[in-house]
Every structure is written in C-alpha cells, then in structure tokens.
Image (cartoon, helix red, strand yellow):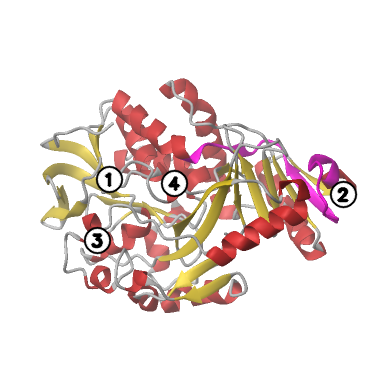
Amino acid sequence: MSDEHLPDAVDVAVIGGGIVGTASAYYLARRGLRVALVEKGHVGCEQSSRTWGWCRQQNRDRREMPLSLLSMRLWDAMRGEIGMDPGFRRTGLVYATDDAATLAAWEGWRPVAKEFGVETHMLTGAQAAERIPQNRRQWVGGLHSVHDGKAEPALAAPVLAQGARQHGATIHQNCAARGLDLTNGRVAGLHTERGLIRADAVLCAGGAWASAFMRRHGVTFPQASVRQTALRTKPTVNLGDVLYCPDLAMTRRLDGSYTLAISGRATLELTPQGIRFAREFMPQFIQRLKAVQLGVSGSFFTGPESLSAVLGHDPSIFEATRVLSPKPDPKLVAAIKANLAATFPQLANLELEGAWGAYVDCTPDAVPVISAVERIGGLYLAAGCSGHGFGLGPGIGHLAAELIAQDRPSVDPTHFRLDRLVDGSKIAVGSL
C-alpha cells in the first residue's frame, strides 16, 4: 500500500498512519484535495491496532457526544463507500457490575443518553446474567447500549488508507516526518526523511508523538501517554460480542477470538515530558490515582516523551523508533487471566494468542484536540484522543478535513480547540 515516490506538492500533508490520520486523509481526498500521508512505521502499527475495537456512544463525555454520533454514521457508511470491510458491526454493548456505586454512575449518565437520543437500558442483576451466558458472577445490575458496536483494529486504518488512495491520496510508509517548512510564519511544506513535500497545509495526527513534533516548532501541546496492556485469546465459544465489567472487558473478533483488558488499569511512566506537563495533568492524576500507577522505564530515554524529544534537537528521533511497542505488564496479564477464570471458569485454561502493550495519548481533560494552530498558518492538530480515538476516529478525521478545507463543520469544534489547554482556562476532566 506504500507509494514509492513522494509527490512534489500537495494541498495537505498528513502525519501519522493511525485511524485519525487515515480517516483525515480519506475525507480530505474525497473532497478532491491532493493528499500525501506519511507514517514512520506502517499504517495502523501503534495504538490504532492495539485497542479494544469499541465504537460506542455509551458513557462518553458530553463534549464528545456530537462527534460520537457523527462517527457512528461514518462507520455505517464506510464499507459501502470503500468496498472493504473494516469489521464494523452494531452488536450492542453489555455492561454488568457487582458494585452498586458503579451501577449508580451508569444510571447517572442516562440524562446524556436521553439528550442525544442514545438508546440504552438499565438491567437488573437477573437481566444482566441472562445476557452473559455461563458466568459465575453475582451481578447487581448492568445496562445495554443497543446501537453501539465494534470494529476490527487490524483492519480499520488500512481500509481507510486504501479508501484515501482510491481518491488519489498517496501513502508513504517507513517515511518519518521531521519538521515543517515555513515561510513567513506559514506552512510551505513538510520535511520528511525522504525529502520535502511542498504543501499548503499540514495535519499532525501523530498520536503519542504529536507533542514532540509540535514542540520543535514552538507549539505547546500538553500530552501524556499511559501504558496499557491487553491480550488476545485463541478462537473460542461465543460468550457475547462485547462485555464490560469493572475488572474485565471482552471484545469478540471476526475470527472468534477475544481481546481482553481491564478498564482504567494503566501505568503512567515518569518521563521528561511528563514532568514538563505535570501541573496541567495534576487534576486528572488525582482523580484517577487508584487506577493509574506510576512507573519508570526506558521511555525516559527513548520515544516521544524522552529527554531527546523534549529538547527537540534531533530531527531523526521519529524514525529512531519506527513502531512504539511497549512490553505488556505481566502483572496485568495475570490479573486479566484471573478475572476471566473467575467470571467464566470454563475458559480458565483457554490458550492465548498473545499479549501486548500500547501507549494511549491523553490530554489534561481527556478530550481530543482537533484544531488549527493559531500561531502557524496552515498547521492543524488532531491528537490526544485519551483512549477514545478508535471509535471516534472517523468523526475526528471528518472534522479535521472540514476545518482544513474551511467547510462548515458537521459538529461544533469549540470543545476541541488547542487553546483551551494552554490559555489558562479551567480544565474540566472528562471520562476515560
């Protein structure tokens, strides 16, 4: 899917081959704009292929709801438009809990569901048990989000990239962006490891690498990455498509396997970038201290939050790590397996396909940035998805394309502007 030769000039250069970058390239190219997407590794190689695969409206921050509704419509249309299957299915989501406080929190979100027309039903303990076959848990209740669903993480970004190519975009894998070419404070092009692409606009959709790229041009983007762990089983019996409970999340894949994880369990690693933005993230750290653990690893010295990235002196830092692939946390892997066995004893000895780690890039308020960068004309940012990027990816890309093309936006972009994080405004922490 890679194009060998860089174009001399395009209307828009997109940095990042995850779901946000590929969706942006797709919706830009559909508008007839000349687009080149550059990716330092390969399409979908980092967080976009390591996610649970959920496409949901349920329990989202209210600020994200219009974007979520748009994304679901775009997911619906994608297969027909592109002619390839991203694995999207409106299976519904089933939530269940044995904790009364958690159930009350889910109940508390129902006014948001009503406001935006999301069909969701609270479940009694008995009703939750009926929807989750052969389990050993004593649920106090749950909920059913009827029209939400899932897509296939390994397929979604490649499908969107292929869709972009169908409309004339070029895709350049193993081609890292190094920096902007600027003329009189405005974008004139993008420097890559293979050469210069002249461009009227550049969109940075670099995920966990976005803050490091923006910093080298004097743009502050508060961003922190948390390391999460998930595992995948071999194909097994069907126990439902999507199940969430506080200590286990399960997503059935097209091949009959399951992706397993624990919501909110992650490691915040001590890094130079983390120290740089500690003040901005302190309210979120305090709110989530029980779920997020602090740790130290090699990311202090390598990767997007390292000292080299913060200092910004090395333009080749982005190709130095082609794929950001942290090791899974063995303690979390053990906890996931134990929780699976406690819920479904018949799966206690289920063979695993593997486990992986991933870095989820977050903003201080856990709401993404989809925004023009005011101080540099023609520069745009779409990042900081805070664990919500896969399901929202089509909507984020669609909105970014509208902003770049100066079309009337489908949703109000006010909540997603970059300036909210750097202009001294009070930060309201959203849901993860």
Which numbered disc flags the more N-terminal residue, 4 or 2?
A: 4
Q: Position of residue 151 (x, y in %)?
A: 54, 36
**Quick one: quadrant of the C terminus?**
bottom right
Magenta residues, as a range?
A: 129-153
Which numbered disc flags the more N-terminal residue, 1 or 3?
A: 1
Q: Which mark is residue 124?
A: 2
Which numbered disc flags the more N-terminal residue, 1 or 2?
A: 1
Q: Residue at x 34, y 50 (%)?
A: 205
Query: Viewed as shown, does residue 23 lie left or right of 36?
Result: right
Residue type of the residue flagged with mark 2: Thr
Instruction: Decide: is 38 above or below 376.
Output: above
Which numbered disc flags the more N-terminal residue, 3 or 2?
A: 2
Can residue 138 be seen in the rendering of this structure?
yes
Residue type of the residue flagged with mark 1: Glu
Which numbered disc flags the more N-terminal residue, 3 or 4?
A: 4
Question: Is the residue marked by circle 1 packed among few (<14), some (14-19), or many (20+) residues within 10 Å?
Answer: many
- According to the image, label 1 marks what residue? 39
Q: Residue at x 76, y 46 (%)?
A: 346
Q: Position of residue 339 (x, y in %)?
A: 70, 58
- According to the image, label 4 marks what residue? 48
- SS for callout 3: loop
Instruction: Tell me how far mark 4 sits from mark 2, CA to CA.
Output: 34 Å
Q: Nearer the viewer, mark 4 or mark 2?
A: 4
